[in-house]
C-alpha cells in the first residue's frame, strides 16, 4: 500500500507566540517550529501500518516555506520513506483551498492508495485542508479516524464517535483526517535521524504545479493576544473565621464558582 | 546554521531529538521515581526504542556507530533537562569491553540484541568490599573445570544488576601470590544473569539517591568457558580500556548537570524579589553564578579535548581523567551555588534542586574518587613518586 501523509509546520505548542505590529500575523523570530500534533498522529498511523505490512511505503508532503523542510526531515527520522516540499513566493499567505489544490496536483502525480492528514492544524484549527483536498480530488473523505486496515478490496476505517467507533469501508482511494489516538507518535530514532540526513527532499515550485491558486479565500483582519490575567488577591490579615466568611462571599458573588 | 561545522549540526540534531524525549519526562516524573526509589523504566524504554543507547555500537552490529563525543552529547542533554542518565548510561558503554576484546562469534551473538534493547548489558561486577580502588587485589576466584569456570566471591556497588540480562564480571583466574606482573591474573566473563539463577544473590543497597546498586554474593557460579572475553589473565587491561570512555561520558553528564543548576539558579535569581529587587542583582548571588558558569565552560573544553582524542584513537588517559575531575567539580560547585541562590526553597523537593544536588554529588566519588584521579595525574603525568 502506498500512503501519503500531508503535514503542516506550526509553532510548537510550548512556544508563547507574539502578535506582530500589524496585528495580522505572529512574530516568527524566536519561534520553535514543529509538525502539527494531529499530523504527527497521522504519521504514526501510517507508520504503524508500515510496521505491520512491510510492503507499505509512507511519503510525506508539505506546502510551506523553506523552513518547513525541518518538519519533513523530522517525519523522515520517524520512519517515513520519502518527502516532498512544495514551496514558492507567497506560500505563507496561501489559503486553505489553494493549499488543497496544490496538494491535489502532487497526489495526482504520486497516486497513493490513501492520503492521511491531521484532522486540523494546531495554529488556525480550521480543519479545512483535508476535506478540501478530498473534494478537489473527487475522493471520499472520512474524518476523526483512529485506525485503518486493508481489507478485501479496500480499506476498513475506524472513525471515532461518542462512546465508541464506527467502521467505515472505502473501496478505493480515500482521504482520512486523523484524530488523536491512544498510541503517541513515536520519537525520531537515532538510526532514523542518520538515514534522514542522507535523504534528498525534492522541492516543487508552487507556481509550476498548474493548480488554481485563486478562488475564494479568507483574510485575517486582526489578531490579538488573550488579555493578561489579573493578579490574584491575597487575604491574610485578620481573624481566620472572618477571612473564611469573606472568601466564601467572594467566591459566590464575585468569582461565581459556588 | 551559519558558521557551524557539519559536526556542530549533528550535535544540534542530537540535542534536539534527545531533548524531545526528555520533555516527555519532566520534573514531576523524575521527582516521583526519586521519591519511590523506582527504576525509571518508561524513560529508559523510550530512549532504548529510539536507539540512543546503541549509539556506540557499530552499524554492522545493529547500532549507529557514533563516537564517544556524540554519545556524550546524549547523556549531557538528559542531565541538562533535569533527568538522570545514570539509570542507563552503562547500557551504552559496558558493551565496549565485549566490542574491543570479544571474539567475532561473541559479538555477532550479543551485540545486535544489545543494540535492539532485547538484552540489557548494564552491570559490570568489578569492585569488592576488600578491594575498593585497588582492583588488582580482588579476590573473587574463577577456577577452570573442563569447559567451564566455577566462580566464588563477592562484589559490591554492582549497579543495575537487577535491571540487566547480562553482566560482565571481573574475576581472578591466577592467585595473586603466583603473579610476577600483578596487573595480570584477572579475567573478564560474560554472565547470563537468568542462567546464573541462585548462584548470584543480589542484595540491593539503599543509598541517598535513586541509584539501583547491589552487593552480590557469588556461590559456585558455572560460566561456560566460551563466555571468557579475550584472553585469560588479561582482564585488568581490558577494563582499563573502557575506563577512558566512561570518564568522558560521566564528565559530559556533569557538564549537563552544571548547566541545569546554573539555568535554574539564574531563572530564580531573576524572578525572586527581595527588598524590592531581583536577588540576582546582588553580587553575592550573581558572582558565584558567573564563576560556576566559567568553571563549567572550562571543564567542557577538557571534556571535548578528551572526546576528540578518544575518537581519533589517540591515547587520552590524562585528558579523560582530568575531564571527569574538572566536570564533577564544576557540577558540584554549580549545585552548591544553585542551592544557595534558592535559599530555603532549594531544600523543597518541588524545586528539584535537592534531588539533582544529591545526584550530582556522586560524581566526585564515582566511578572513581577524584583523589585517585589526582594521584594518577601526579604520578603518570607529572612523574612524581607513586603515593600508594
Image: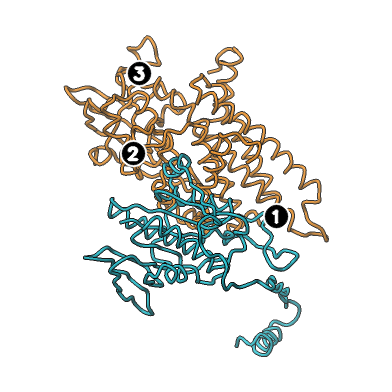
How many discs appear? 3
Work out whether residue A39 or residue B306 is closer to the camera in this orientation and state it.
A39
Percent x, y of residue A254: 69, 87
Taking the spot 33% from the left edge, 60% from the top edge, the residue there is: A113
In the picture as drawn, the residue positioned furthest to the top comes out as: B180
**If the image is split into quadrants, where does the C terminus of chain A sit?**
bottom right
Left or right of A127? Residue B159 is left
Q: Which residue is mark 1?
A: B268
Question: Mark number for residue B114?
Answer: 2
Q: Quadrant of residue B212?
A: top left
User: Same chain for the residues at labels 2 and 3, yes or no?
Assistant: yes
For disc 1, the neighbor class at 10 Å (few under 14, some 14 to 19, many from 20) is some
Chain letter for the residue marked with disc 1 in the picture: B
For disc 3, the neighbor class at 10 Å (few under 14, some 14 to 19, many from 20) is some
Report the chain shown in cyan: A
Residue at mark 2 to residue at mark 1: CA–CA distance: 42 Å
At numbered mark 1, what does the secondary structure look like: helix, strand or loop?
Answer: helix
Chain B visual colour? orange
Chain letter for the residue marked with disc 3 in the picture: B
Q: Earlier in the sequence, mark 2 or mark 3?
A: 2
Amino acid at each position: 500500500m502506498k500512503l501519503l501523509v500531508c503535514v503542516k509546520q506550526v509553532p510548537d505548542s510550548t512556544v508563547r507566540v507574539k502578535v506582530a505590529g500589524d496585528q495580522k500575523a505572529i512574530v516568527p523570530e524566536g519561534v520553535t517550529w514543529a509538525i502539527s500534533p494531529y499530523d504527527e498522529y497521522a504519521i504514526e498511523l501510517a507508520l504503524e501500518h508500515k510496521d505491520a505490512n512491510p510492503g507499505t511505503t509512507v511519503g510525506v508532503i508539505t506546502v510551506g516555506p523553506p523552513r518547513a523542510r525541518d518538519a519533513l526531515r523530522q517525519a523522515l527520522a520517524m520512519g517515513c520513506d520519502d518527502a516532498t516540499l512544495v514551496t514558492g513566493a507567497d506560500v505563507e499567505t496561501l489559503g486553505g483551498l489553494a493549499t488543497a489544490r496544490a496538494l491535489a496536483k502532487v497526489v495526482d502525480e504520486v497516486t497513493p492508495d490513501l492520503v492521511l492528514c491531521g484532522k486540523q492544524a494546531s495554529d488556525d484549527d480550521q480543519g479545512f485542508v483535508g476535506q478540501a483536498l478530498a473534494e478537489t480530488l473527487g475522493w471520499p473523505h472520512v474524518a476523526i479516524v483512529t485506525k485503518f486496515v486493508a481489507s478485501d478490496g479496500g480499506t476498513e476505517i475506524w472513525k471515532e464517535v461518542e462512546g465508541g467507533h464506527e467502521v467505515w469501508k472505502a473501496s478505493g482511494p480515500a482521504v482520512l483526517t486523523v484524530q488523536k489516538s491512544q498510541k503517541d507518535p513515536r520519537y525520531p530514532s537515532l538510526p532514523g535521524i542518520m538515514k534522514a540526513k542522507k535523504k534528498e527532499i525534492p522541492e516543487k515550485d508552487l507556481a509550476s504545479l498548474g493548480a488554481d491558486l485563486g478562488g475564494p479565500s479568507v483574510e485575517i483582519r486582526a489578531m490579538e493576544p488573550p488579555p493578561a490575567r489579573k493578579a490574584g488577591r491575597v487575604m491574610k490579615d485578620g481573624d481566620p473565621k472572618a477571612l473564611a466568611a469573606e472568601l466564601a462571599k467572594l467566591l459566590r458573588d464575585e468569582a461565581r464558582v459556588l | 546554521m551559519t558558521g557551524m561545522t557539519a559536526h556542530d549540526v549533528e550535535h544540534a540534531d542530537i540535542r534536539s531529538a534527545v531533548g524531545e524525549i526528555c520533555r516527555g519526562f519532566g520534573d514531576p516524573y523524575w521527582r516521583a521515581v526519586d521519591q519511590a526509589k523506582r527504576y525509571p523504566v518508561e524513560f529508559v524504554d523510550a530512549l532504548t526504542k529510539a536507539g540512543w543507547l546503541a549509539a556506540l555500537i557499530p552499524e554492522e552490529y545493529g547500532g549507529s556507530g557514533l563516537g564517544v563525543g556524540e554519545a556524550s552529547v546524549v547523556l549531557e542533554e538528559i542531565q541538562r533537562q533535569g533527568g538522570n542518565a545514570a539509570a542507563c548510561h552503562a547500557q551504552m558503554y559496558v558493551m565496549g569491553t565485549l566490542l574491543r576484546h570479544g571474539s567475532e562469534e561473541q559479538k555477532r551473538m550479543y551485540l545486535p540484541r544489545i543494540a535492539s534493547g532485547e538484552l540489557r548489558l548494564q552491570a559490570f561486577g568489578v569492585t569488592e568490599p576488600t578491594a575498593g580502588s585497588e582492583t588488582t587485589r580482588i579476590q573473587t576466584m574463577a577456577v577452570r573445570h573442563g569447559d567451564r569456570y566455577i566462580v566464588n566471591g563477592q562484589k559490591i556497588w554492582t549497579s543495575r544488576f537487577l535491571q540487566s540480562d547480562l553482566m560482565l564480571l571481573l574475576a581472578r583466574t591466577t592467585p595473586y601470590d603466583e603473579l610476577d606482573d600483578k596487573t595480570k591474573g584477572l579475567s573478564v566473563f560474560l554472565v547470563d544473569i537468568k542462567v546464573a539463577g541462585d548462584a548470584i544473590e543480589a542484595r540491593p543497597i539503599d543509598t541517598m539517591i535513586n541509584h539501583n546498586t547491589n552487593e552480590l554474593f557469588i556461590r559456585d557460579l558455572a560460566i561456560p568457558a566460551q563466555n571468557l572475553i579475550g584472553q585469560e589473565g588479561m582482564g585488568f587491561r581490558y577494563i582499563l580500556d573502557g575506563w577512558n570512555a566512561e570518564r568522558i561520558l560521566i564528565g559530559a553528564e556533569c557538564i549537563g548537570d552544571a548547566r541545569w543548576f546554573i539555568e535554574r539558579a539564574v531563572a530564580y535569581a531573576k524572578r525572586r524579589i527581595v527588598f524590592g529587587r531581583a536577588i540576582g542583582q546582588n553580587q553575592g548571588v550573581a558572582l558565584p553564578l558567573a564563576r560556576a558558569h566559567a568553571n563549567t565552560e572550562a571543564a567542557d573544553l577538557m571534556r571535548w579535548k578528551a572526546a576528540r582524542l578518544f575518537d581519533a584513537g589517540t591515547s587520552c588517559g590524562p585528558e579523560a581523567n582530568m575531564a571527569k575531575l574538572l566536570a564533577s567539580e564544576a557540577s558540584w560547585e554549580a549545585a552548591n551555588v544553585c542551592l544557595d541562590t534558592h535559599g530555603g526553597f532549594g531544600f523543597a523537593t518541588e524545586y528539584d534542586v535537592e534531588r539533582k544536588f544529591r545526584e550530582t554529588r556522586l560524581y566526585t566519588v564515582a566511578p572513581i574518587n577524584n583523589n585517585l584521579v589526582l594521584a594518577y595525574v601526579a604520578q603518570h603525568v607529572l612523574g612524581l613518586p607513586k603515593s600508594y
